[in-house]
Structures are given as structure tokens and as C-alpha cells.
Amino acid sequence: MHLNPTRRQVLQFLSACGVSLALPGMTPSAAARRRDERPKSLITLWMSGGMSQLETWDPHPGTKSGGAVKDIPTSHKDARISELLPQMAAQLHSCMLIRSLTSKEGDHERGAAFVKTGYRPEPTLKYPTLGAIAAHELPNAELEIPQYMTLAPDRIVPEGGYLGNQWDAFRVFQPGRGLSNLKSRVNPERQADRLQGLDVVSQQFAQRRQFGTKRTLHQNTLDRALQMMSSQQLKAFELETESLGVKAAYGDTSFGRGCLIARRLVEVGVRAIEVTLPGFDTHVSNHSGHVSQCKILDPAIAALIQELRERDLLDSTIVLCISEFGRTPSINPAAGRDHWPNWFSCLIAGGGFRENTVIGATPTDVFEGKKSDGKLVLPAEPVLVPELYATIMATMGIDFRKEILTPIGRPIRFADALPSASLLKEDVARKVIKS
Amino acid sequence: MSVAGRAGTSGVPLSKNIPAGSRTRMSKLLEFWEFHEMRAAVIIFALLIAALVLKVVQVAGRVEQLAGSPAVVTDDQQLGPAVARLNEQFRQQWQAENVQVGDTVADLTVLRRLSLAMFGTVPSLEDIRAFEHDEQPNRIDRWIVKMLQDSRFSDYFAERLARSLVGVEDGPFIVFRRDRMTAWLAAQLRKDVSWSQMTKELIAAEGLWTDRPAANFITVARMEDESLNVNKLAGRTVRTFLGQRIDCAQCHDHPFDPTWKQADFEGLAAFYCQASLSPGGVTDYETGKDQQEVVYKVVDPGAETGRVVPSAVPFHPEWLPADGGLRYRLAGWVTHKDNRRFERATANRVWGFMLGKPLHEPVDDLPHPVDGETDALDILGQEFRARGDRLSVLIRMIAMSDVFRLSSESSADNADTYTKQVQAWAVFPLVRLRPEQVIGSLFQAGHVRSIDQNSNPFVRVAKFGNENDFLNEYGDMGDEELLQQVGTIPQALLRMNGRFTAEQSKVDALSAPAQILNFSPDNAAVIDNCYLACLCRFPAVDERAYFLNLLESTTEAAAEKRKANPEPPAAGPKLKTTRTRAQVVEDLVWTLYNSPEFSWNH
């Protein structure tokens, strides 16, 4: 037995007994530090499969491209969005709608890689996602749980890329249904004994390997995992304390629960959260596919934005609803729409971005997006994904120009573009964009 | 089948003396019995057939086992002089850089390294015991030869090669069959086919992706419009077979390496322009439907039409075969006997497979070979070429080298000195096990016998299922498999609390922990065997003492002491007696699974 236990041993023992030394994140004092004092968080709502702009944010009813969807008025005086998003129509005044995002990647994997990182994928280097950069650059020392989470993820996991796999998003497969592998399978006393034995074996290995073992970060990772297991901050994943009304507002779906947990994670201080809603790859029956997915999306995103505003968290939280690409203006013989990266839409709320604003416009009746001479038509006021991400980084306080020496020896900037002042509120733009 | 049964089913009373109600009950009972008797017979028969089929499959698939008689290294397999040249190369480097060289490790550590590199698992307790009992000379070299003949090697190495050839993604629907390609690679490795020959087949493959598995190297590049992505194929060809990166020259001259021009990339891509996909598989068409020659065209930004780019290689065009299709000629150039890039790239990748870290990083970004200069890759490459371009030669040379036997321990007293040692390969690098090595080792350590083609089919199926589930949760490294990474929190949680660790450390009927507990002669042997099964070494004195104390403080030990000495003990230190022996062994195995030593190659 060790008569003089080390700090780590004490922590291990306490964590084995379910005791946490860190202060819980959800306290009145944490709430008091919101707005300017609080670093910003990012919630990405990932519409996996390629959400159709025409059935959601950019409907063109009555045109050749429009399909069966109708549009409805919104709280923005001019903008009309799809009838499938009635709750968001009432919230649009507090959001910025970009209808002119452009990409050149029409494959799911490549498209997702581009839109999640701001860099076109290449075979020799993996880029970090925007969330990974945020977690890397704005660490929250009070956090006992990972800085970057993905809720209900699909196949394409948000990765740390060249920053290292320790910046990969922590995956929560079933939001609101418990977390995997966070409970020890033995009682606290036995767990404490196991950890003591582990110290004996680890110390033996570290003899004459002190520099090597330090670099492996094995012990560091283990300690953080143990700390997480006993953290009070895990309560952010427990929805029992939320009222039935709140839960109902988000919707009893994996995505709805994910959005509610995302709000709770922001309150704890998690830097970046991604919530995935799959099912948008509607090559067949596009309209009905979007009807069913919008029923899930609409209440969840509307409740999220409303709650963040009510809790005074919207200024310090960016909500970005985006997809890997849009869908074709034409409707195929299977009543579906295919991949369309040439223009698509995203919605942003909070974090200093302009409100009650619609940016860009797409042609009202251009079949296949091509003029008669075969040239591709671009949307008005096109917004590039790297430009959008440089703007998000700037408003979060991340140096978007920062270069990181990648494992292949190439220095790479966080963002391959400059931020756009036109996307931000004037006072925010003056503050964060200096040149 | 009984007569009574038949009578019962026909409804005829069995005896007049039996009351009507009882007769009915009896009839139903007999009916029930007959039905279940028949069903039981059918089930037993089906089980016998299933058992027979399984046994036939098992016997048919039986291969030579590692734990059998030691292999013989024939005279023509002797690599002594070449290994000596390689060792001398490193010795001179260490001397020139004035670095302290690590100690040589015990043979058991070498066996663990070999097993991880060649089988993807730690060695089984069965193999370890056979290795220990092998007292013939050249034990390591003979075991390497033996391991090369084991199907675990060909299967595992094939999977690793496939990553560099086609990545890990599912690839295009229907026209890409990764499993076929991996099986083909494994078959080639079993036959020790020349890597040049395999490379030629991959680059120039024609036919169906199922019938000609090498064609999957081409079909994986199919795009949504059904055409082949020649840029992807050109970049992959240079990276995989020549160990260099010219991908960025697709759009502009290489920014850091003036050797690579955009024209070089385009010229190489043009070699793939005549390949196309049809229901008949991969075919080359020299002329199109319009009877015009199929040429490669590049459309520059802003240009209305494409410009024709002829196929061309960036250096030594004289290595191109005079005849044959474009891909055939490219394959001949890539593998040409004077193309040092080919052998250096191969040696660097195999070095990475064996040590977890390539000699030059990244594995596919080698510097250009310099005329008149010879480094370790050249020494390996020359022997590889001299012996028929076989990967087995590289594997044996690397495994026999001094570097492979160096300890990962360092006498360095500061981080910089240690870094210098690592960079000069003066100590064995600490490398995180690949995800499939972690689950492979976990599963192997949970069984006393080797899990291979001869194993019980149920064990093999369980291993396959476990591996897939584990990799889904643990995460795969994809084709960046030789990139050095650290572990993550979800991985640590999975190792500590996941079902895989719990299942493999459980003391139940057939598990290694149970067999170790039940058949080891004493407590010290229990600890030794657990250490051997999990870490492939014996415990240090302190470790043995620590766990021995736990094993001697179990409820069973306390009961025995009470039985031997019914008097209550005098005042003194009171030992914990709340654990059973099984629990202590489970905790020990859990501890070893979660130790850094288990998760890192050292």
C-alpha cells in the first residue's frame, strides 16, 4: 500500500467512489457569466444526406423546379419559407438565412468533409472540423467532459483531423437514452482496487520510459475518462429534470432530445456540439421524405433558438443548421431530387450574426440550373463555406489566420478565406474584424 | 415410433378398462409424446448434420499451426549478410549522431512485436509456451519463417496492404468488392508471390471485380457519372507504389518540390484514360464509339474546350515497355528493376507495418533517391530485388535487424535526448496499437489456444463479431494507419467499462482467466500466466508481490486458514477478505488490459 498517495491516486479513489472535486457547471454563477464574458459555443445542426433547399429554406412554388411544396410568410417581412417549417417561420426574424452557399462537392463523403471543415478533401491530409478547431482553440478549463460532442451521429464522424484524434467529437449515439461505457461494471471499492493495481503495472512500464510514456498521453486520457465518469456535468445528458412541456416542445425524437441536450451542454460550457438529423438523401419521394424530416426538424430548432434567447444564451451561442449540399432543381422520374452542390441554404442564429436577414437568391425557374448556352448559373451574392467559417471563427474569438504545422510538414491556416463583415451585426463586425 | 402412439393418433381406445376421460388424456399425452419425439429426432439429426458440416469445414480449412514443430530456415533463405549490412548502416548512423543505443530485449518481447505486426494480436499462451520450449538455435528466425506460413499472417497483412491500395471505405456500390481484393491479396501472400507481379496485376487489371479481384484497385475510382477518376488513380499509384505525393500537382506545380510539375501529374493520369467500366468489368478501349483514339483531355479553368494530354512518365521514359496497353506500360515502368522509388516505397511501408512507424514519415512522402547514396531503405530494397521482389524478404530482414530487437527503454535524462534517440531508431518506438490489434489482442488474451483457421467455428464467428462491434465503437484509423496518434477518452472508457473487456476478463468455463485459475499449480503461476497471456512477459518482483498478496487474501484463502487454524488470529494487520479468487483474477486481467503496456507496442 502507498502511505503517501499522489494527487492522481486521490482523484482516482474519489472518482471510483463517484465523488467529483470540480464545481458543477450549471450554477447561477455560470449563468451570470454569459454574454461578453463567456466564450462562445457552437451548435451545428447537421442535416445529413443533403437537405433540399427547395422544400425548406428556399421554396419556389409554382415554378418548374418548385415541386409540390407551398411557401408561407414568416416573421421576416419579405422572406417566405416552406410550409413544412411553420414554427421556424415564426422565428425567422431572429435568424440569418443564407440561400447562396456554394460548393463543388456533390458526393456525400466529400461534400460532408468540405462543409464540416471548410476545405475540399484531399487524399494526403485530413482537416479538422470547425467544431474541433473551436474546442482546440477555446478550451474550457472547468469542463470535466469533452469539449466537443456529436449527438446522434451518423457514419461520418466529425474529426480532429491534423489536430489529432483527441479532438474527435465525443459520440453520443442515443441522446436522452443514457451514455455508453460511463459506468464501472464493479462496485466502487473494487474499482478503487483495480485502479490501484493499474498504478502498479503502469509504474513498472514507465520505468526508464518516462519521456516516452508521457508522450503517449495514456495516463492523461485515462485520468480524464475517470474524471468524466464521476462528473456532475454529466447531468446535462439527463432530461428528467426538464419539464414535460419543454421536452414536448423539442419533440420526442432523437434529434429533438439532441437539441435539448445541446442547450444543456452549452450551459455547462461545452464548446462545440453537433446534432445530426439523417434522412435527407431523397433520391426517391423527395417531398414526402422532407415532410417527415421537417416534422422532426421544425419544432426542435425553433425550441432551441427560443430557449437560448429566453435564457440569454443566444448572443454567446451560434446555431448553424447546414447540410453537405442541396438538391437538384429538377425532379427525377422517381419523384426525387439528386445531389446539388451549386447552391444550397443554411440558417444561422445567434453569436453576433445578423438577424432578420436573408442573404443570396437563387434563380426562380432555371431547370437544372443551366442557361441555354450550357453555362452554370450562380446564385446572387454567393457565400463560400470557408468565408462563412472564417466569420464564425472571428466572432468566436479564434484566430482564423493561425497556421498549424500539420503531420505532413505543411503549415495550414484554420480558414482558407477572410471573414465577411456583411454576415455580422455592425457592432460585432467592428469588434471582431479588424482588417 | 410406438404402436400405442399410432393408435392414439387414430383415436382408437387403447383399453376398454381405461375410463373415457383418462383415455382421452392418455391419447393426448401419446399424441404429444409422438409429436415431440419426432421433433426431437429431427432436431438431433439436424444438429448432427450441422456438427458434421462444421467439422468438415474445420478440417478442410485446417492449416499448419504455429505451435507445432519448429520450421527450418533453408540455406537459400539465409539473410545474414544483408541483415549485417543493414545493422552496420544503423551503427554508423548512431555513431555519427553520437546517440546512446538502447539495450536488446528478451526474445518474448520480440515474439510479441512479431505477433502484433504479422497476426494483429498478442501471441497466445499456447504459442508462448511452445516458444519457450523451443531450445533449438536460431529460434526467432525459424519462428518468423513459421509465422509467414500461417494464415493469420496472410489474412492480416492482406488487410493492411488493402488499406494503402483502396482505403477502408465501402467504395462504389456493386462494382467494388473489397473483400474479394483482400482475399486475393491473402492468397498471393500465402504463395509468396512477387510484389512487382501483384503491382502489375493491380495497375493493369482487366475483367470483373469479382472474377479478377485486382481490378478493384481500378473500380474503387468509379465516379457518380460512371466514369473513372483518373486523377485519383494517378495519385494513388504514385503514393502507394512509389512512396511519393504528387497529388497537389493535379492543379499546379508542386509548391515545395520543384521536381513535380503539373504536367507530370497529367501525364501519369493519362495512362488511365482508356480504362472504362462496363457490365463486363474493367476494359481498355483504344478507340471510342466514334472510332477516334481515346485520349486524355484536361479542361483548364475558364477554357471552353479541353486540351489533349499524352501519357508520359516524369522520368526515365526508357523504362516504359515498348508494347502493350497504356496501363500495362505504366505498370512496367512503376515496377522496373531500376526504379529505386518502387523498392524504397515498399521497404518503407513494410518497415511501418513491422514497427508501427515507417522509416520515413509520412509513409508515402519519401525524398527523391540520390544517385550514389545508399540508406537503410536501399539496403532493404536491394535484397528485396535480388530475391524476387518478395515481401517476405523485407519482413524477415526487418524482423532480424538490430533495430527490431532494441528496447523501448531509454537512459536519456531529458526529453530532447530521448527525441534524438527515437529519431535515430536507437530505441524501439512506442507506438499505439491499431484498433484491430487492440481487440485482436483482447480476444486472443481471453483464450489460451491460438485463434486461427483451426479454431472452433463458434470462436471464430465470435471473434469476427466482436472485432466489428469493437471497431465501430473504438474508431478505425482508415488509410492513415501509420500516422502516429494518441488515445482518446471514448477509447479509454471502452477499455475500462465496455463489454469486450468484461467478457474477455470473465472467469467462466472456457475463458483463459478461468483455465489459468483452475489449472495453474499455485498462485504465483496464476499471476505469471495472466501476465504472459496479456502482456507476453513475466511480472516484475514488485508486481508479483502485489498481486500475490491479493490472491492470498481471498475469501477462499481465509476459509482455508480458518479450517487449518480455528483459533482467531492474534492482533495484527487485517487482510481484506471480501474478494473471491475469481474476482481477483478478473481484476488482475482487467488491470493488464487497461495498462499502457497492453495498448502500446514497445
Image: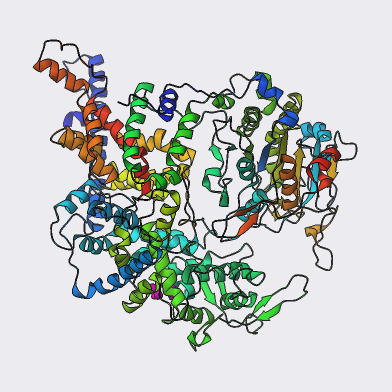
Q: Residue furthest right?
A: A77
Q: Residue at x 26, y 39 (%)?
A: B43
In the rendered image, residue A262, in percent from the top left (x then y), is placed at: 64, 32
User: In the figure, residue B269 lies in which quadrant?
Assistant: bottom right
Which percent across, then down, holds residue B502? 35, 34
Q: Residue at x 69, y 23 (%)?
A: A31
Q: Main secondary structure of the magenta part?
A: helix
- Quadrant of residue A45 within the rendered picture: top right
Closest to the observer: B190 or A423? A423
Q: Nearer the viewer, residue A287 or A15?
A: A15
Q: Is residue A397 left or right of residue B168?
A: right
Whether residue B331 can be seen here:
yes
Q: How many marks?
A: 0
**Above or below: residue B209 compared with residue A176:** below
Residue B207 visible within the image: no
Task: Tell me if A352 is positioned left or right of A257 in this view.
Answer: right
User: In the image as oriented, which residue stretches furthest toward the left?
Assistant: B564
Quadrant of image for the N terminus of chain B: top left
- On screen, residue B339 versus residue B172, left or right, reads left
- Give B163 or B574, whichever is nearer the viewer: B574
* Residue A10: x %, y % from top left: 42, 25
Residue at 64% x, 68% y: name it: B255
Colour logic:
rainbow
Measured from the top left, where is residue A84 in percent x and y? Answer: 76, 37
Magenta-tinted stretch: B194-201
Up the image or down, B309 lies above or below B22; here it is below
